[in-house]
Amino acid sequence: MIAIDTKVTAADLVPGLESLSAVARRCVDLLRERWNEADGTPVFTEAGRYTSRGWTEWTQGFQYGIALLLFETTGNEEYLEYGRRETVKKMAPHLTHIGVHDHGFNNVSTYGNLLRMMSEGTIPQDEWQREFYELALKLSGAVQASRWTALPDGLGYVCSFNGRHSLFSDTIRSMRSLALAHQLGHVLMGEQDERISLLGRLLAHAETTGRYNVYFGEGRDAYDVRGRVVHESIFNVDSGAYRCPSTQQGYSPFSTWTRGLAWILAGYPEELEWLETLSDDEVRACGFPAGGVAEISARYLEIARATADFFIEQSPTDGIPYWDTGAPGLSRMGDYRDRPADPYNEHEPVDSSAAAIGAQGLLRLGGYLARNAGSKADEQAAARYTQAGLTVSRTLLGEPYLSLAAGHEGILLHSVYHRPNGWDYVPPGQTVPNGESAMWGDYHLMELGLMVKRLAEGKAPQRFFDIRRPA
């Protein structure tokens, strides 16, 4: 269980943030000088050098998004120009990619960050650049929403790359793309000019994910533990009936792949923040059968708190989870949750990328509860989640997780990609993967670093939907 430091502040982490910026500069420079585009998109490192893995092309937006976030944290316009140029040159195919559930990863990390920074005044206003970013995000949201499996009772989901039967927990993070497109006034046009609400599909997807991919300790099956998350749910697409839990990257459908847990923990607090900007009339007009903002927010809060509690309880004391809560080697590690994680152990790898993603969710959940506290218990919960997020952040911003070796191309060490497939690099003399980085881990540590930097400056964390035109 995470040993939550109730005293640590965001300001205490500023030296770690400075180290993060230095490491990120090194890594961006190394990769852009060496990487051969003919090799595809960098995904994860082997012996410190990024390599590709053509499963789906879901990491290119992270590559350029890191550079954009590096500009935002350092003010060095070289990285803005690099990230912006490569977004324009390379990212267009991701906008029209109909075969994946990854639009929130690729497109919000690039076009979305650029539009947000322009809206906030971090980069100069330029009408045609803004129009370009807005059009890209409208297109992305509609294309992502078109990958739809309808279920009875107004439910449904954006299906994974596995097919129409498959609902991934990861995809809650791609609801950002639908949210942005809706916020920009866009709809998905269907047959006979049907105007399909992107908000409606977002709300239906989020409820379906919460209902089938998250557990609440209510006796759903023999492994129903509150806050547990299943990576994938399988449906009969002819009848719409739920069939079973499944997993692609976890150990089993009845344990929790911790990066899947982290996607849920990050996604719902983000959507809670966005819901604060919507009206009941807007929600009721979208076609999803819900009472209004308060009802939906209560549901998302239930999901977020359950998964946050599970993350805190199942992680080691420093907040870095092992890759799956049911991984078989954990049984040989004794009371592994009562001490800091050991990335060099002989039995099971940790996944620092899950920690970087999950810490964001903890901080956002804590902030949301603090703003909306209705009781002393809410205030205490807000402080607990916020301090847990800062505790995890402190761990990630130092050794052995921050990549300090001069020649290493990664930012965050000890990420894991696909343990069941054996894709992760195992160093000589070791028995489990360690010491390597993944593009999503690097990107989400940069996002987390920017959040903590803003908190240290007395500002609110950045939000994906802060894209309004200046008055």
Image (cartoon, rainbow, N blue to C red):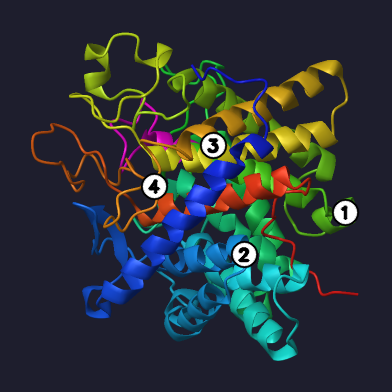
Q: Amino acid at mark 1?
A: Ser
Q: Is residue 156 above or below residue 62?
A: above
Q: Which residue is mark 3?
A: 393
Looking at the image, which residue is at 36% across and 47% down? 403
Does residue 134 appear left or right of residue 403 in this picture? Answer: right
Tell me if residue 54 is in the magenta stretch: no
Total numbered labels placed on residues in the image: 4
Please name the residue that numbered disc 2 is placed on: 72
Counting from the top left corner in percent of width and height, residue 339 is at: 40, 15
Of the pair 160 and 85, the residue shown nearer to us: 85
Q: Are marks 3 and 4 in contact (CB under 8 Å)?
A: no
Report the disc number at residue 279: 1
Residue 13 on image: x %, y %:
60, 38
Q: What is the magenta range?
A: 242-261
Name the mark on residue 469: none
For label 4, the SS is loop
Identify which residue is drawn at 30% across, 47% down. 417
User: Can you give x and y, in whole percent of width and height, for residue 51 in the image?
Assistant: 23, 62
Residue 412: give its label. 4
Q: Are marks 3 and 2 in contact (CB under 8 Å)?
A: no
Crowd band around label 4 with a 10 angstrom C-alpha radius: few (<14), some (14–19), many (20+): many
Residue 398: percent from left, percent from top: 45, 37
Query: Which SS class for mark 1?
Result: loop
Distance from Cα at disc 3 to Cα at disc 2:
19 Å
**Disc nearer the start of the sequence (4/1):** 1
Which is nearer the N-term, disc 3 or disc 1? 1
Amino acid identity at mark 2: Glu
Label 2's element?
helix
